[in-house]
Image: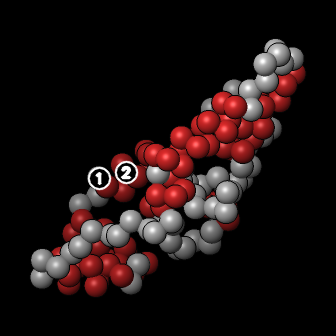
């Protein structure tokens, strides 16, 4: 359960608006839900998973033939989440710290904005390739 000060910030995830039987991306599940899915033996879950993900049959064929390959790293990934990109964002943030103390209100406002963003309905994945 969220602390009381955060409860009003949480938005309803779009996941709850799916119709019965709609597939849910594994990555959108909580850790507990992912572990629950993984606890089901593959031979039991294959039929329902394959029906929701047509690529699984191709994957099975490639796997049986020993032809699975690593997914290539997206071309923009290094520029967005690589070490240099992280360091540049960190430096921009650190450089923006004012030399004079901020009011408690400013710190609380920044914390509230950050929490609200993380609890928003659109914050589904820890890594997003946006325009920024």
Residue 103, position in %: x, y?
87, 17
Give the vertical position of 16 relative to 64 (above or below): above
- Is residue 6 among what the camera can see? no
Residue position for label 2: 36
Whether pointer 1 and pointer 2 mark residues with C-beta atoms closer than 8 Å, the reply is yes
- The residue under the point 60% across, 37% down is 90
Identify which residue, 36 or 119, lies in the foreground: 119
Which mark identifies residue 39?
1
The count of marks equals 2
Is 123 positioned to the left or the right of 63 in the image?
A: right
Instruction: Say which residue appears at 66% left-offset and 43% top-offset.
Output: 118
Residue 124: tell me if it is visible. Answer: yes
User: What is the x, y in percent for residue 83?
Assistant: 46, 46
In the picture, which quadrant includes the N terminus? Answer: top right
Quadrant in the picture for residue 93: top right
Residue drawn 69% across and 27% down?
A: 3
Relative to 75, is 11 on the left or the right?
right
Q: Position of residue 13 (x, y in %)?
A: 67, 55
Tell me the element at label 1.
loop
In which quarter of the view is residue 20 placed?
bottom right
- Up-down: is 34 above or below 107? below
Locate the C terminus and report the quarter of the image it occupies: bottom right
Mark 1 vs mark 2, CA separation in Å:
5 Å
**Label 1 environment density (alpha carbons within 10 Å; few <14, some 14–19, many ≥20):** few
The extreme left residue here reads 65
Q: Secondary structure at mark 2?
A: helix
Residue 88 as seen in the image, left or right of residue 7:
left
């Amino acid at each position: 359960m969220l602390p009381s000060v955060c409860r009003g910030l949480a938005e309803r995830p779009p996941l709850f608006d799916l119709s019965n039987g709609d597939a849910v991306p594994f990555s959108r599940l909580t850790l507990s839900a992912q572990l629950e899915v993984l606890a089901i033996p593959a031979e039991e879950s294959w039929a329902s998973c394959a029906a929701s993900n047509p690529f699984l049959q191709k994957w099975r064929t490639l796997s049986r033939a020993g032809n699975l390959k690593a997914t290539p790293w997206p071309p923009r990934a290094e520029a967005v989440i690589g070490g240099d990109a992280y360091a540049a964002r960190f430096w921009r943030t650190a450089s923006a710290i004012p030399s004079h103390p901020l009011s408690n209100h400013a710190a609380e406002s920044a914390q509230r904005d950050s929490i609200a963003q993380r609890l928003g309905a659109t914050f589904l994945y820890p890594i997003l390739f946006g325009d920024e």
